[in-house]
Every structure is written in C-alpha cells, then in structure tokens.
Image (cartoon, rainbow, N blue to C red):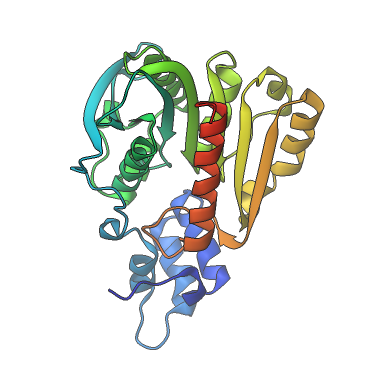
Amino acid sequence: MDRKTAKDFPQELLDLYDEYVHGQVGRRGFLDRASRFAVGGVTAAGLLAALSPKYALAQQVAKDDERITVSYETYDSPAGGGKMRGYLARPAKAEGKLPGVIVIHENRGLNPYIEDVTRRLAVAGFVAFAPDALTPLGGYPGSDDEGRALQAKRKGEEMTEDFVAAAKWLHTHTLCNGKVGAVGFCFGGGMANTLAVRLPDLIRAAVPFYGGQPAAAEVPKIKAAILLQFAENDERVNAGWPAYEEALKKAGVKYTAHHYPGTNHGFHNDTTPRYDEAAAKLAWQRTLEFFNKELAGK
C-alpha cells in the first residue's frame, strides 16, 4: 500500500484538516476550501479520504499477542456518564502488582489506534486502561467522523469526571500497585494535564501529547512529573505553551518539554499521513523511559 506522509500535502491543507478534525470547520467547509488543492484528477473528497485514518496501518501489537492479556471492563462514574466501559491490557505473565497507566483517547472515542497504544504499554510492563468517553452514547461507533460527532454531544465536565473515576478505578485495581500515570493524545493530552491537576495525590506522571493546557491558577496543584510532547507545526496547541511553562516554573513542577521539528498535530498517530515515524518512535521511547523512571523506579 502506498503510504502517504505529511510531505505529500501542502502545510495549508494539513492545517485545514486539523481544523476539520477539531470541529472548527465542517465537512462542506473543508471540501470547499480544499478544492483548490485538488489537481491532477484528485478531488477534494479524495484529499479528505487520503488524510483520514486507515486503521489497518496502525496495529503494532496484535489483540491476541501472547505477551499480553486484554479485556473490556466496566467501572462506575456517578458524577459523569454512570456505568462506563474501557479497554484493559496487562502483561500475560507478571510477578506481583504493576504500575498503571490511564490512556486517554482523542476527540473521537476509543478507536483502534488508542487500543493499540494500550497494548503497547502492556508489552512494556504496565497495566494500561483506556476508558471510552462515548460509552453513554453506545461507545466508539467504528468511524472517527461519527465518533467526533458523538463526543461533541457530551458535556465536558462529565467526561472529565469519567476519566477521574477511571484513574481511581485503576489505582485500586488488584493488578495495580497503586502507582498511576496518564498519557493522552489531542483531547486526551489536555485530559492528562487535567488529571494531574484534579488528582495530585494519585497521578504520579503525566504525558500529554499535543494537549491543551490547564489554567495557570490550577498549575500549583500539580504534584506529578510532566513530560510534554509538542508538534512544531501545531500553532493551535502551542499558543498556550508559554503561559503553561511559566506557571510550571513558578509552581516548581518537575517537567520536561520536547518539540519535534517539522511535525504536525497527531504525529504519533500511525494511521494518518500526519504520522512522523522518527518523531513518534522517539517520543514513545521517551514516554516509556519516563514512566519506567517515575512509576517503576527503573
């Protein structure tokens, strides 16, 4: 399969796609504005299809990988969506309890990419749990476009409570040693920051990938170590970084930030052309090293 990369598309088109996936422009608006890039027999609809996720490309750890055990689990979120569902992955053979990591999806529910990330963490020796914020609406519908539409219908404060409840659930799970971290992407990156604020005595380490920042006044509540992963060509998210960094420094929070040259928002997601293999591998290596240090003491 001919796999496209970000270099195959004008940056302006990539930026327009970012607006589309974050609800700043609708499908019709995207197609209208993308039409000027549709040349050589390529249509605007074809460009949208080329930029959209192809989950067959994503799987790095198979669902039936013998190294891990996976299952769908439910937990209670009384202040959020009620009875919630998520994807649990853990090493098949482990001696004793293990550190836990909450994996937080993008703005479209628990899709195959996030499930694969959860399995990757299990292979690395963690008990990983990925809640699906779309549970009250039937769960991830199998399409990112439909998933975005569903997630937009949920109240933000209730979804926050769902992830808070998930972190508490994992913290007390029989397989978890009580040391919990969080990693999230896009919407999930912002939520990883939020969990560090909301659960300072529970979340020990947080890794937001291109995620929105908490209010400066909330930052002093953070006790976790923070590893921040940014894409260079992500003006929307990066605009909030200077104020966040200032607040982190002022509050004495332990943090490290990496900006990956030439990358776009979503560069870790290996299902779309925005994926940058070198940056994604480096960012993931740093993520695992960070969790090993902060959660596993390695």
Q: Quadrant of residue 44?
A: bottom left
Residue 71 is situated, as x and y percent measured from the top left of the image, at 21, 29
At x 41% / y 12%, what residue is drawn? 79
At x 62% / y 47%, what residue is drawn? 237
Residue 189 is situated, as x and y percent measured from the top left of the image, at 52, 38
At x 50% / y 27%, what residue is drawn? 296
User: Furthest-bottom residue in view?
Assistant: 40
Is 253 situated left or right of 86 in this image? right
Is 72 situated left or right of 157 in this image? left
Task: Using the image as rendered, state which of residue 97 and residue 265 is in the foreground.
Answer: 97
Q: Quadrant of residue 219?
A: top right
At x 23% / y 32%, what residue is drawn? 69
Q: Could one spot residue 234 in this view of the protein? A: yes
Q: How many marks?
A: 0
Residue 202 is situated, as x and y percent measured from the top left of the image, at 53, 15
Q: Quadrant of residue 203?
A: top right
